[in-house]
Image (tube, grey):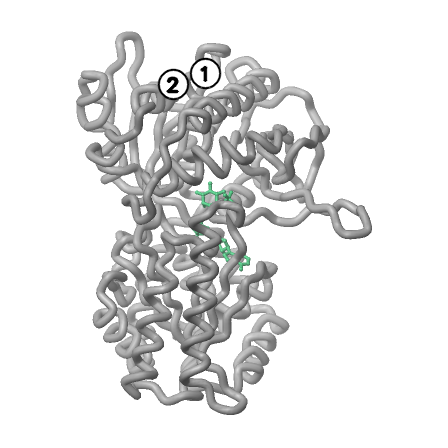
Amino acid sequence: MTSRSSFLIVANRLPVDRTVGPDGTASWRRSPGGLVTAIAPVMQRRKGAWLGWHGAADELLEPFENDGMDLIPVPLTAEEVELYYEGFSNSTLWPLYHDVVAPPVFEREMWESYRTVNERFAQAAAEVAEQGAVVWVQDYQLQLVPAMLRAMRPDLRIGFFLHIPFPPVELFWRLPWRRELVEGLLGADLVGFQLPGGAANFRMLCRRLLGLPYKSNEIFLEDRVVTTQAFPISVDFSELDTLVREPHIMHRAKEIRVELGDPEHMLLGVDRLDYTKGIGRRLEAFGELLRDESLAPGEAVFVQIATPSRERVEEYRRLRDDIELQVGRINGEYSVLGAQPVQYFHQSYDREELAALYLAADIMVVTPLRDGMNLVAKEYVSCHHDLQGALVLSEFAGAASELRSAYLVNPYDVEGLKREMMAAMNASPHELARRMRTMRRRVATYDVDRWASEFLTALES
Ligand code: ADP
Ligand code: G6P
């Protein structure tokens, strides 16, 4: 692996996590979340290096290669995992940027740790970037990196992409460190958001907080111009489209239906176990459909897959308990011998099993209370070349601005959720095909390669 690179991704996470088994042997496992899903195929097709944390504390690792990518681990201490990652990133910024659906925590020592770790990432990038290299910094965990890196290496071309929503000024204003964060982002030449609304929120904030003028997409600093723009992230459509046409995936999809007891309707939820995803609301709606006898036990099965996530953060622990209690209650009340209406899995799956699940499901239920994009929705669409299957999609997911032919719902409205879930279950094949065709056209044309190349072209121009 070369020691210097002309193209760098800087993200909190590497695409793989290091895990050590009970017998002491270490192995690499794919890291969770949409950022990795999107960036990994982009990096496999370009020459460059990816700097990030490898998921374990207090370990210093050498750069290595994995799955065709050059990876450079950035270490975190156990205290930094607690204060920077679980703390400022996921107890302060994550809830604040997601419409405060959980209360954010404001702690000075978390902020200090965030600054220290951002400095370390900037330093690491400065050391491996070639003269004039392109450095693409990712997501809310590293918002100070652009300005820090620019101070160290003014020769670089620096881009930043935020994978989660950028909040309205009134919410952002609560942050005691609001000025530092905005100045951090303004170190980039190009700041990318999922939706035009996020970019507009950011420009407004720069004007109100720092008095900076802007015109259309450009913010004017004393000596430079920063471009802000929306680039809706996407998935590797053709990879999924090809995968689900493989005989063994088609066979597995059929097998899944049999294993579930051949229900008339299979509903599916696939999420990180996160309070922004609205898992409780969708289960509540499904439970009420059974209670109201709109659905008979055995007629429909709801498969909910919840990837373990941020398990030491209090809000996530509480969520897990709540969801598991809710699943137990629904199953306790509406199971019949041999048929449980909710099948719940607190596990990660490989891409093939996930693709088979998408293909098997009649209805994909994606109901976040707020979500930057939601790649699960786009993955489901990519897997349905049969033009069957319905997507029930929250209006508060970024994906809703592109997938207008989904069954759009307000996840706070349980009656509306029930109505749209039933409409999806009762739709004619013709109606399903009409909706699916439109959605597939969008995801096929605006896939993850297009997303990356549009961002990088804008950055380099
Ligand atoms: P987020 O980035 O907030 O987790 P997204 O929906 O954008 O949400 O991305 C989630 C990604 O994680 C998708 O690529 C999805 O396939 C993957 N994923 C979600 N749940 C699982 C699981 N149980 N096993 C494996 N991959 C999963
Ligand atoms: C979201 C974030 C990513 C993050 C992922 C998984 O997609 O936007 O930055 O990597 O969730 O979360 P985790 O905390 O496990 O990295």
Q: Residue flagged by tag 2: what amino acid is it?
A: Gly
Q: In which quadrant will I find the N terminus?
A: top right
Q: x and y percent of residue 313 in the render?
A: 48, 45
Neighbour tally class for label 1: few under 14, some 14-19, many 20 plus, Cα within 10 Å:
many
Q: Is residue 451 left or right of residue 227?
A: right
Q: Is residue 160 left or right of residue 120?
A: left
Total number of numbered discs in the rendering: 2
Q: x and y percent of residue 377 in the render?
A: 39, 59
Instruction: Tell which tag, 1 or 2, sits nearer the viewer.
Output: 1
Element under label 1?
helix
Kindly identify the residue that appears in the image at 40 percent across and 55 percent down: 444
Q: Quadrant of residue 319?
A: bottom left
Q: Is residue 139 left or right of residue 371?
A: right
Q: In which quadrant will I find the C terminus?
A: top left
Q: Is residue 135 left or right of residue 226?
A: right
According to the picture, the residue beneath numbered tag 1 turns out to be 148
Q: Earlier in the sequence, mark 1 or mark 2?
A: 1
Kindly identify the residue that appears in the image at 59 percent across and 66 percent down: 353
Q: x and y percent of residue 180 in the render?
A: 35, 19
Q: Which numbered disc covers residue 187? A: 2
Neighbour tally class for label 2: few under 14, some 14-19, many 20 plus, Cα within 10 Å:
many
